[in-house]
Image (cartoon, rainbow, N blue to C red):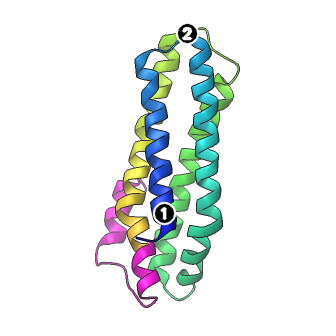
Amino acid sequence: MPALIEELKGQHEALKRMLLLFEQRPNREEQQKLLAAAKNKLMEHLELEDAKLYPFLREQAQHDPDLAKMLEMFDADMKRVSALVQNFFVRYEGGWDDDYEFLMDLAEIKARLSHRIEVEEKHLYPEYLARKQNPKHKLKRGLLDRLKGMLGLG
């Protein structure tokens, strides 16, 4: 497996571990540090995808309309996920008074990020790997329809 995909998956695991640490109910100071670390890890991950994963796939998509549609779906989903996550960090970076509300919002973020990670690892990363091996690779039949449902776009 190429180093890029291993690194991206490793970042996914690190991010999931950070978010799970909140369930251990650390003190407020530790929670603030965890929140900042999770934000930094997420930004690092997105920057790596934007710098190395997506440029290659977008280049491939110039010759494959199905891949272009797939990337449009991932982009649309990412806009929704990004808005949710950005609002979360803006809301809680300075602290919070209501632990229940914070934990409910955190649960929503964890669920949404976990879903995005799962779809990326099952569909986007394998597509990258397949096209690295064979630039003429084509999407599997029915994948676009499945992705539409998985990403809540249809």
Q: Amino acid at mark 2?
A: Asp
Front residue of 23/64: it is 23
Q: For the magenta stretch, what is the residue range?
A: 128-153
For numbered disc 2, what is the local secondary structure? loop
Residue 150 colored magenta?
yes
Front residue of 18/123: it is 18
Residue 118 x, y percent position in the rendering: 37, 52
Front residue of 49/68: it is 49
Q: Is residue 126 left or right of residue 95?
A: left
Which label belongs to residue 98? 2
Q: Amino acid at mark 1?
A: Met
Kindly give the residue lying farthest to the left in the view shown.
141
User: Residue 154, can we see it?
Assistant: no
Residue 121 x, y percent position in the rendering: 39, 59
Question: Residue at (46%, 70%) from the top-left corner?
Answer: 70
Q: Distance of mark 2 from mark 1, alpha carbons?
A: 35 Å
